[in-house]
Structures are given as structure tokens and as C-alpha cells.
Amino acid sequence: MQTATPVQKKVSRPRADALRNRERIVTAAREMFVEFGPDVPLDEVARRAGVGNATVYRNFPDRDALVREVVCSVMDRTAEAAHQALAETGDAFEALERFVHAAADERISALCPMIASTFDQHHPDLVAARERVEQLIEEVMGRAQKVGQLRSDVAVGDIMLAVAQLSRPPAGVGCMSLDRFVHRHLQLFLDGLRAPARSVLPGVASTMEDLRSQV
């Protein structure tokens, strides 16, 4: 007796236009969250993205899902900036610089406070994105310290805290008006990270666990 061949179930993939619409929604939401804060009407997000309201809700059933996707996508892009710099040049300090400036361009300091105020900060997608960033920056910093580019008394928490403080203020409080200062001050900070260190830092290096314990 012949064994019946199992029927292969066809896996449906999102259409290219659907993926483009999703990306347009995320981009528009990021811009508007930075300008106005996380409570901006989703109808306005749809209008800026050039899609209908139904398209927004089909992709993101509620505001929390959209905010989470925006924050995750921003973290992924900043990590990719460091990864790409490392692949192109092999220079760990340059990769660190690329990450810091990319984080400012992505307006990390305006978006990340939304994590605590609008949705579950322990959501698996958010935790995975955060871990990808932290692991990559730990690797980059470790390589830079190993070859004597980066001072030895700093850790990932020091970098992340400085990026948040030296980039833009929270969303909706005129963050666009300070753009001309941001990269200048971040570069001053980065130059201070170079080895050999010219001074002894007070306290101890800050880890991400140190920062999270203060929240």
C-alpha cells in the first residue's frame, strides 16, 4: 500500500507593498513621537505615512504595539550602524563612534523614555532588541579596550547614559532646536573615551544592570 504524500502547506509571505506600508507607518510614527510625544493621534500617524487608518490598525492593533515597534526598530538600526562600521573598517573605536552618532540621529533619548511609560518593558521583542544592542556594544568596547583605543574604566552603561544625556531632550520639548549642538558635544565625549586616559574617573564603570536598577 502506497503511503500518501503529505500535502505541503503554502506559507504566505507579506506582499512587498504591505511591507512598505508597515515601514512607512513606523517611520512616520517615529517622527511624530519625537515631535509630539507618544500620545499623538494614530489618525495623524496614518496621514503622515500616507496610508489609511485601517492599514495602521491592521499592522498594529494598539498604540503600545506601534510604540514598541518604533523603539525596537530604532535600536536595531543603531546596532546595525556599529556592525557595519566594524565590517567596513575593522576599527572598533570607529564602530563605537558610529553607534553613538547614529543613536543621536535616531533620537534615542526622545524615544526610550516611552518604554517605561507606555508599555511592558519586558516584552520579548523589546528585550531581544535591547540585548542585541548591548551585546554588540560590549563586543565593540571590549575590542577597542583590548587594542588600547578605549580607556579601561568605562562600560556599556556609561556609553548609554551619556548618549541619552548629551543627545536630545525628551519628545515634544523642542528637541529639534538643539540639533546643531548634539554631534559636537557627542564628539567631545567620544574624544574623552580614548586611551590613554588623561584623568582618573570618580566612582566605578556603570553597567546596564546598574542603570536598570535605578529605574
Image (cartoon, helix red, strand yellow):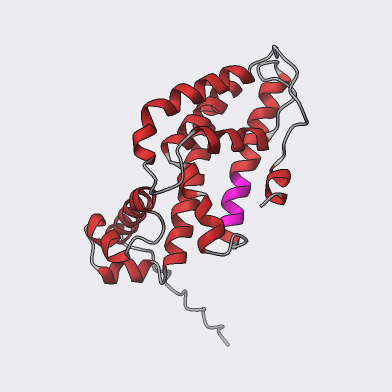
- From the image, give the main secondary structure of the stretch colored magenta: helix
The reply to whether the magenta stretch includes residue 204 is: no
The reply to whether the magenta stretch includes residue 130 is: yes
| Quarter of the figure that contains the N terminus | bottom right
Q: Residue drawn at (63%, 20%), measured in percent from left and top?
A: 193
Q: Does residue 91 appear anywhere in the picture?
A: no
In screen coordinates, is 157 left or right of 163? right
- How many numbered callouts? 0
Q: Does residue 111 appear anywhere in the picture?
A: yes
The answer to whether residue 37 is above or below residue 91 is: below
Q: Give, as a single range, the part of the protein colored magenta.
A: 126-132
In the displayed orientation, state which residue is furthest to the front: 173
Q: Based on the displayed image, in which of its 4 quarters is residue 63 positioned?
A: bottom left
In the displayed orientation, state which residue is furthest to the bottom: 1
Q: Residue drawn at (61%, 18%), measured in percent from left and top?
A: 192
Q: Residue drawn at (46%, 41%), measured in percent from left and top?
A: 169
Q: Based on the displayed image, in which of its 4 quarters is residue 198 positioned?
A: top right
The percent coordinates of residue 174 (x first, y second) are 36, 42
Q: Residue drawn at (30%, 57%), measured in percent from left and top?
A: 16
The percent coordinates of residue 93 (x first, y second) are 59, 22
The percent coordinates of residue 178 (x first, y second) are 38, 32
The percent coordinates of residue 40 (x first, y second) are 34, 60
The answer to whether residue 5 is above or below residue 48 is: below
In screen coordinates, is 134 left or right of 5? right
